[in-house]
Image (cartoon, grey):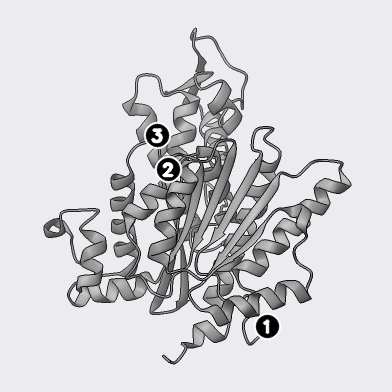
Amino acid sequence: MAKKRESQIVMLDHSKAKVELLEKYLQKYLSIISNDGFTEKINLFDLFCGEGIYENGGEGSPIVTLRVLKDLHFINKAKSKITPKVDLVFNDTDTTKIEKLKQIISEKKLHYEDFGKLNYRCKDYKEIVEKLSVYINGLKNEKAFVFIDPYGYKEIRASEIKALLASKKSEVLLFLPTQFMYRFDEKGTPQALIEILEELVDIKNWKATNSVYAFIEQFNNALREYLGKGFFVDTFTIQKDESTVYCLFFFSSHIRGFEKMLETKWEIDQDHGKGWSYEKTGDLFSTIKTNYLEEKLLSFISEKEKPFNGEVYEFALSLGFLPKHVTEIFNSLQDDDKIEVLSQTNGKVRRKAFYISYDNYKNDFKKVYFKIK
């Protein structure tokens, strides 16, 4: 039997960050989906679930998922709201881990029958992911969320993610040890990485990078290009130490889900450019953050004849920013008389009214447009 890595026994800080992102996003995701008036059932899949609790007491993805579900159920019950059934599948190739997980869930009373079905599997990833895509694509008034946290990266293929997303009824959160992928890329691409990349790009055009962040950006761009229009891809990097960086990749076909993931990222990481403080003057770091989005927005608006509010909303999200960030910048630009907001008939619009939100994107995509003065 292969010796277990420390990260499989003890919950390290980067694993805590990973699980925290999952937890906070599921809180938003389950709340929205359970109250959309359409979805009859939610399906959650954890394909490398592990045994649930690490030796140092850290709680892994299945335990956190169940706690979120349990909290939502009782919150809705207190408000006399009905929570759709949530079926869960916890899978791991190690039967010992599955048995330990079953025991923990039972002892802690983390699941009740009226939540939905709870299923355990001991299947190989390749076997389960192929069947899973067929199952998800056959769903009617149901949604699915898939968490993939592999013990490495050799088995992962972009075509499998694409198949899971094909019906536009699912979202996928994928964790990859990008630091190790990058190290190979830097030293000479191994066959395992070549097989992943050649699905995405002409391998001859893949450029070796000089940093793991550059590798992640190039890989993320390749994924976006591969999935095509109608799908959103975003990343959340986790730095274990000065030389080790991992990355979570989020995939969705729904812009609302994409926005909620961005909200989750900003809630967790208020540093390193993911926090927000719009100041015209300030330290060098805040100025850099501010100028980036402002510059992009001004360029986007100037290049279009009538850049409508719905387009600006989508553009800002594609850059990793939220509607509130756009609003702060537009407020400042309007105060400085640098931007004009017009209605379809070129009529004046109430000051500070920019209509940058999902509701306006959905119902009033062309409510107003913007013009640089």
Contact flag, marks 3 and 2 (Cβ < 8 Å) = no
Amino acid at circle 1: Gly
Q: Quadrant of the N terminus?
A: bottom left
* Residue 318 image label: 2
Q: Earlier in the sequence, mark 3 or mark 2?
A: 3
Nearer to us of marks 1 and 2 is 1
Task: Check disc 1: other Cα within 10 Å, few if <14, some if 14-19, many if 20+.
Answer: few
Query: Where does residue 330 sit, x and y in percent of width and height?
Result: 53, 33
- Res 278 seen here: no
Q: Is residue 366 above or below residue 332?
A: above
* Residue 309: percent from left, percent from top: 50, 26
Q: Amino acid at mark 2?
A: Ser
Question: Which residue lies under the disc numbered 1?
Answer: 57
- Residue 364 lies left or right of residue 209; in this view the side is right
Can residue 80 be seen?
yes
Q: CA distance from mark 1 to mark 3?
A: 49 Å
Label disc, if present, on residue 125 of the rendered structure: none
Mark 3 highlights which residue? 298
- Measuring 77% from the left and 76% from the top, which residue is drawn there? 107
Quadrant that contains the C terminus = top left
Element assignment for label 1: loop
Name which quarter of the figure residue 331 lies in. top right
The span from disc 3 to disc 2 (Cα, nearest Å) is 15 Å
Front label number (3 vs 2): 2
Say whether residue 114 is left or right of residue 231: right
Query: Going 32% across and 71% down the picture, which residue do you hit?
Result: 154
